[in-house]
Image (cartoon, grey):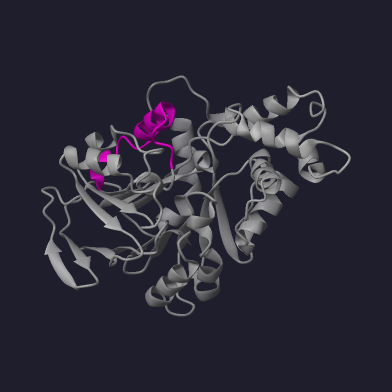
């Protein structure tokens, strides 16, 4: 297997190519979308089959290259976190009242429009199968048990069964923790305002700019208050990609800039990877549920993509203790809030190895034999 973390700046784009199976993890860049397009052209020939694309969440630095990828390649399946209609409308309202530019992706527009219109699962986009991973916080999966929620785990395993059957002995396992918290907070906030109390989020999305009303200022006040916590990152999936059973395969690192092969110094040569997107690992409940969900695969991980490009706002200081692996940060060199010095210091202080990939670096590549 060949695993490549591509240098696209502030974003994420990873490819795993097996002998007859290809997976992609995120496909976007805030630094320059042209970097993503260039890497797509370098790594894929026209109409090349991609079996599955995992999108951790629908923030544009993780998804704005997806339209070009779809036009270039034959994508068979896309896996995304399930979105609540209210979450989509909140994002729309926030962008509208603050005049925030949004991703113009055709794929994203399709997902948003269908989520709002049908308020349910989306089965396909053109000829591409869509799999939506529900959140553990969904009412159907609530549990007070300290161990892994087997109902949720088995549900996700079943959703991914057709994909995992295509690549025996290897497991792609996504985890989505939360999707409703912000919706409930927003609903409570508008209900506390007499002028908004009788309106639904859907009503507001249609009438937020009514010149006869003061909705804009009221909505700005709600968004600026501390009544609504978190961000779009609260709906960011984590994905484990690794062996079902532990394997000690020989593993090499390759720097494309020098094409210099370096033997892995890891004593166990673990070959699994954890892609954390922008997951809010700093939040105790998020971190604990993440550890419980992946408990049986933690020791198979040799590479972990640090959440949110190394930002301290999503990093958990306990994270390196639980992994004997390389910590890779994909970030943009011009973004001061990513690849935080305190995150680097903490990982190094614990004796872990760090790989930094940005728009100025070479490709980080692993060859697993």
Within the image, what quadrant is residue 208 found in?
Answer: top right
Residue at left offset 64%, top offset 44%: 91
Within the image, what quadrant is residue 190 found in?
Answer: top right
Question: Would you say residue 295 sits in the magenta stretch?
Answer: yes
Q: Is residue 264 visible?
A: yes
Q: Nearer the viewer, residue 271 or 190?
A: 190
Question: Looking at the picture, how far across and down is residue 110, in whole percent?
Answer: 66, 58
Q: Is residue 1 visible?
A: no
Quarter of the image that includes the N terminus: bottom left
As drawn, the residue found furthest toward the bottom would be 46
279 left or right, relative to 83 = left
78 left or right, relative to 304 = right
Q: Give the residues in magenta.
A: 279-302
Number of numbered discs visible in the structure rendering: 0
| Depicted 59 relative to depicted 86: above or below | below
Within the image, what quadrant is residue 225 found in?
Answer: top right
Question: Looking at the picture, how far across and down is residue 67, in whole percent?
Answer: 56, 67
Question: Looking at the picture, how far across and down is residue 239, in whole percent?
Answer: 40, 47
Residue at left offset 76%, top offset 43%: 205
């Amino acid at each position: 297997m060949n695993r490549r973390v591509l240098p696209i700046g502030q974003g994420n784009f990873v490819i795993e190519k097996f002998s007859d199976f290809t997976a992609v993890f995120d496909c976007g860049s805030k630094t320059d979308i042209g970097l993503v397009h260039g890497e797509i052209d370098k790594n894929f020939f026209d109409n090349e089959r991609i079996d599955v694309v995992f999108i951790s969440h629908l923030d544009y630095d993780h998804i704005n290259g997806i339209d070009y990828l779809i036009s270039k390649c034959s994508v068979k399946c896309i896996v995304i976190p399930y979105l609540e209609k209210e979450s989509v409308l909140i994002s729309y309202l926030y962008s509208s009242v603050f005049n925030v530019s949004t991703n113009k992706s055709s794929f994203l527009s399709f997902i948003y429009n269908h989520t709002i219109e049908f308020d349910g699962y989306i089965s396909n986009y053109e000829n591409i199968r869509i799999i939506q991973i529900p959140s553990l916080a969904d009412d159907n999966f609530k549990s007070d048990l300290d161990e892994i929620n087997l109902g949720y785990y088995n549900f996700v395993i079943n959703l991914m069964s057709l994909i995992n059957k295509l690549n025996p002995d290897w497991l792609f396992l996504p985890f989505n923790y939360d999707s409703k918290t912000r919706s409930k907070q927003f609903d409570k906030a508008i209900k506390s305002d007499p002028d908004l109390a009788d309106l639904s989020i859907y009503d507001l999305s249609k009438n937020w700019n009514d010149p006869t009303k003061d909705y804009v200022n009221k909505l700005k006040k709600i968004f600026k208050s501390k009544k609504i916590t978190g961000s779009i990152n609260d709906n960011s999936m984590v994905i484990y990609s690794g062996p079902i059973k532990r394997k000690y395969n020989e593993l090499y690192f390759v720097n494309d800039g020098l094409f210099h092969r370096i033997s892995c110094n890891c004593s166990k040569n673990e070959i699994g990877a954890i892609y954390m997107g922008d997951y809010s690992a700093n939040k105790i409940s998020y971190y604990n549920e993440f550890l419980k969900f992946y408990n049986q695969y933690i020791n198979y991980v040799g590479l972990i993509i640090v959440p949110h490009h190394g930002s301290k706002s999503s990093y958990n200081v306990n994270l390196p203790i639980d992994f004997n692996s390389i910590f890779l940060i994909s970030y943009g060199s011009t973004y001061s809030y990513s690849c935080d010095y305190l995150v680097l210091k903490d990982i190094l202080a614990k004796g872990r190895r760090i790989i930094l990939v940005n728009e100025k670096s070479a490709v980080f590549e692993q060859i697993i034999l």
